[in-house]
Structures are given as structure tokens and as C-alpha cells.
């Protein structure tokens, strides 16, 4: 008998070909919701067929979402509207609820169906605790669905990240704007938005 | 403006336990099944609140190895026990996997109203070919946490058996690899031994 511990490199646990989390279609996801399988307090989104539990946003996150909604609504002007934390249809397997989505038309234009990736002029996530997720799986899902412009308002590093030119699960172009700089919108190039206006005021060091 | 066109923004070292799949309880999992949410052909199991789908159809080598090992183990334990193949095992409120083999005391009719639980299972066996990483990863953690005392992975590609004992938290303190030629004694049957080569199907004939 040979007693050897399984070498650590054999002990990895990424999902393999034989088994993986069950993927839900949008239809099944909505059916489960309609049948009352989810509790009323649950905040969920569907990403790549996975039902993800969302965290209750913290104070800075909520404040920035509210503030950015106003700024973007003004910037886009009439003919567009900005939806905060509402569903966006990406694919048959994806229906996340981005922090902000700017779409043409009025809210009533998106009845009975939510806006689709092609309707989105801009998708924004406000990231603090979810930064890594927003830069990886969320980004890949938006890119694959062809979301033309994705921005991360990065509260941790106090910057705005602009992702454009989607190609497969990536964006070919990434531009980072720091405080003191201004960002413009692809759909409204004449409007300049100060990065600092999108961030919470910095706490004075005491 | 600092432009870094074509590059990914630097990754952040951040623990993000906040983002996780919705967890299903066993009760919700059953309700979803009763309400017809799953397709009849789906092979699912609930592990730590996540519903997993087995992707590949059952292949002959796997089915053969499970059937054969099941027969050997049933013989080994003898009357008063039976071996269940690919049937639900209740680990806790969030886990109900379907291990390849579970050795339990009593007759099948003892489990007519409730599936066996982690405390009834004397031995859990997974036959690993395509699922080796999962069997050594999430599955193993779930079995350890549930306190499964004796967990064997029949590693078909390597023709060996990995025996996990002494669960502590989500790990097993003891992992012993038995090669062909070795014998194993199940914890629940200290008076018997089984040869690794008897538990595994015959090796493939070279050239086939």
C-alpha cells in the first residue's frame, strides 16, 4: 500500500466538463418567479443562465446611482431615458439589472418587453464591492451581447472606466478617466461630464 | 486622460463573497421540480444550494464501473446492508447530491419515505472519469462538511482509489491513495478487505 497525500495541484476545483451549474433560460427564470419560488425580498439577476443573488447596495453606491441617473438623463436629453436597476435582456440566458441603462424613447416604449442589449446606448455599473465581478463576468456578458458602450464608475479607485468596441467576450478599447478629467458620451459627444461629479465627495482626513 | 486602449483594467485584489448564485433549499428544489420547471431529461443534483446539471450522457465505462463496484461492495457488506447507485443522499438543507454509490444499512424499504442521510451513509463512492475535479472539489467539500466518514474516489484514468477519511470542516484530514495490488478496509466493515483491482473494471486491452 502506498500512502501519499493527493498532490495539491490535483486538488483544484474549477467546474469541469462532466458537471456544471444548471443554466436557466429567461423563460424558466420568469416562470420560477411567477410561480412564487423566489421570496419577495430577493434581489436576483440572470447572468449566463445563472441566477445570481444581488447584494443590497451600500450608501455610496445608492447615492452615486441616483446622482448619475440625473447627470445622464440631462446629458442624453429628450428622446432618451435612463433606467436605474431595471432588467436588460441580453440573451435567452441573460437578464441582468445594470445600475444604469440609457435607451431611446420613453419608458412605455418598452412594454411588454424590457429593453434589449441593442437598445442600450450605454450601460453603467457603479462598483465598489462588486468591482471584480463587474470587470469580469458582467463585462463578458455585456460584450458578448453587443452592448456598445459599458462604463464602470469605480468607487474604490475613484475613476471611470469606459469600455468600447466589443469583440466576443471582451472590449477592444478601454479608457480610464481620473478625477479632474471629463468624459463624453458616444451618443452625445458634445456633453462633457466631470468624473468628480460622478463620485462621492472625498472624506476629509481627520 | 490616461488612455490604455487595448488593455484590460488592472484586476483588483478583492474578496467578493457578496456575489454568489442564488441558493436553493431542498424544499425549494423539490417544489421547482414538482412545478415542472426542470425538463424531464435533465440530470440534476443540489450541492450547497446550487443546482448542478450533469452534462455528459452516461457513458459505458462509467456505468459499468459503477455497477461493478456496487455489486462488489454489496457482497462485501453482506446481508443487512445495501448499495444504492446514483440515488439521492440528503446531506443537509442545501445539499442533496446523487453519489455514484452509497452503502447504507437496512433494506430498500427502510428508505421508502425518506432518502438516506449523511449519518446513515456508511460509505460514499464516486467513480471519476470526466468529473474528477468536481469529485475532488465541491463534492468532496460538501461530503466533508456533512461528516461523511468514508469517501472513496474511484479514479478510472489512473486506476487507483483515493480514500478520504477524518472529515474536519470542509476538508478531509486523511487522503490515502490505493493502487492496484493494494487492499482497502471500509471503515464501517473493519473485518473485511477488498482489492483495488477487484473494485475497478478490468484494464482496457492494449490496441483496442
Image (spheres, rainbow, N blue to C red):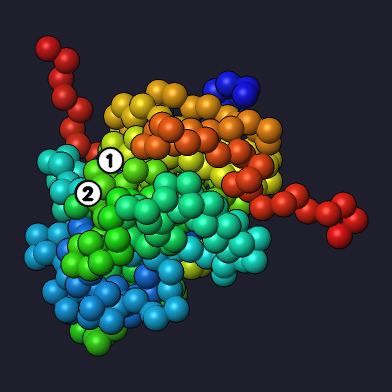
Crowdedness near tag 1: few (<14), some (14–19) or many (≥20) residues, C-alpha within 10 Å: many
Q: Is residue B176 visible?
A: yes
Earlier sequence position, callout 2 versus callout 1: 2
C-alpha separation, residue under disc 2 versus residue under disc 1? 7 Å
In the image, residue A71 lies at what x, y percent? 23, 55
Residue at point 66%, 42% (across, down): B197
Of residues A62 and B127, the one drawn nearer to the viewer in this rendering: B127
Q: Are marks 2 and 1 in contact (CB under 8 Å)?
A: yes
Q: Is A130 drawn above or below residue A178 in the view shown?
A: below
Horizontal placement of B10 versus B207: left or right? Answer: left
In the image, residue A172 lies at what x, y percent? 59, 52
In the image, residue A138 lies at what x, y percent? 41, 54
Q: Can residue B47 be seen in this view?
A: no
Report whether mark 2 lies on the same chain as mark 1.
Answer: yes
Circle 2 SS class: loop
Q: Which chain is disc 2 placed on?
A: B
Of residues A18 and A22, the one drawn nearer to the viewer in this rendering: A18
Circle 1 SS class: loop
Of residues A90 and A177, the one drawn nearer to the viewer in this rendering: A90
In the image, residue B149 lies at what x, y percent? 34, 35
Residue B195 image-quadrant placement: top right
The residue that label 2 is drawn on is B92
Q: Is B31 drawn above or below residue B173 in the view shown?
A: below
Residue A135 image-quadrant placement: top left
Q: Is A133 drawn above or below residue A75 in the view shown?
A: above
Q: Which chain is disc 1 placed on?
A: B
Crowdedness near tag 2: few (<14), some (14–19) or many (≥20) residues, C-alpha within 10 Å: some
- Which label number is shown at residue B146? 1
- Which label number is shown at residue A172? none
Count of marks, rendered view = 2
Residue at point 52%, 57% (across, down): B71
Residue at point 40%, 59% (across, down): B84
Amino acid at each position: 500500500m502506498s500512502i501519499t497525500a493527493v498532490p495539491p495541484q490535483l486538488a483544484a476545483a474549477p467546474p469541469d466538463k462532466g458537471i456544471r451549474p444548471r443554466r436557466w433560460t429567461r423563460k424558466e427564470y420568469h416562470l420560477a418567479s411567477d410561480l412564487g419560488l423566489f421570496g419577495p425580498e430577493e434581489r436576483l439577476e440572470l447572468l449566463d443562465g445563472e441566477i445570481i443573488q444581488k447584494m443590497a447596495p451600500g450608501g455610496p453606491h445608492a447615492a452615486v446611482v441616483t446622482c448619475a441617473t440625473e447627470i445622464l438623463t440631462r446629458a442624453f436629453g429628450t428622446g432618451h431615458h435612463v433606467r436605474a436597476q431595471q432588467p436588460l435582456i441580453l440573451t435567452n440566458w441573460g437578464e441582468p439589472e445594470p445600475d444604469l441603462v440609457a435607451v431611446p424613447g420613453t419608458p412605455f416604449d418598452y412594454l411588454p418587453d424590457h429593453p434589449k442589449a441593442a437598445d442600450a446606448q450605454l450601460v453603467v455599473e457603479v462598483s465598489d464591492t462588486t468591482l471584480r465581478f463587474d470587470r469580469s463576468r458582467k463585462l463578458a456578458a455585456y460584450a458578448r451581447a453587443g452592448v456598445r458602450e459599458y462604463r464602470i464608475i469605480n468607487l474604490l479607485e475613484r475613476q471611470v472606466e469606459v469600455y468600447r468596441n466589443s469583440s466576443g467576450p471582451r472590449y477592444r478599447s478601454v479608457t480610464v478617466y481620473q478625477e479632474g478629467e471629463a468624459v463624453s458620451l458616444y451618443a452625445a459627444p458634445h456633453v462633457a461630464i466631470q468624473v468628480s461629479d460622478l463620485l462621492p465627495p472625498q472624506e476629509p482626513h481627520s | 486622460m490616461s488612455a490604455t486602449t487595448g488593455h484590460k483594467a488592472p484586476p483588483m485584489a478583492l474578496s467578493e463573497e457578496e456575489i454568489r448564485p442564488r441558493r436553493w433549499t431542498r424544499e425549494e428544489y423539490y417544489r421547482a421540480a414538482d412545478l415542472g420547471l426542470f425538463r424531464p431529461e435533465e440530470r440534476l443534483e443540489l450541492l450547497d444550494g446550487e443546482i448542478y446539471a450533469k452534462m455528459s450522457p452516461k457513458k459505458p465505462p462509467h456505468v459499468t464501473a459503477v455497477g461493478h463496484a456496487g455489486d462488489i461492495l454489496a457482497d462485501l457488506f453482506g446481508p443487512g446492508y445495501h448499495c444504492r447507485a446514483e440515488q439521492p443522499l440528503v446531506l443537509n438543507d442545501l445539499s442533496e447530491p446523487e453519489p455514484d454509490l452509497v452503502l447504507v444499512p437496512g433494506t430498500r424499504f427502510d428508505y421508502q419515505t425518506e432518502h438516506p442521510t449523511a449519518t446513515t451513509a456508511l460509505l460514499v463512492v464516486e467513480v471519476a472519469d470526466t468529473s474528477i475535479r468536481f469529485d475532488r472539489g465541491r463534492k468532496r467539500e460538501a461530503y466533508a462538511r456533512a461528516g461523511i466518514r468514508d469517501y472513496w474516489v474511484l479514479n478510472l484514468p489512473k486506476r487507483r482509489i483515493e480514500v478520504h477519511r477524518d472529515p474536519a470542516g470542509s476538508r478531509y484530514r486523511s487522503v490515502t491513495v490505493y493502487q492496484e495490488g493494494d487492499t482497502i478496509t471500509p471503515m464501517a466493515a473493519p473485518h473485511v478487505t477488498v482489492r483495488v483491482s477487484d473494485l475497478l473494471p478490468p484494464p482496457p486491452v492494449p490496441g483496442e
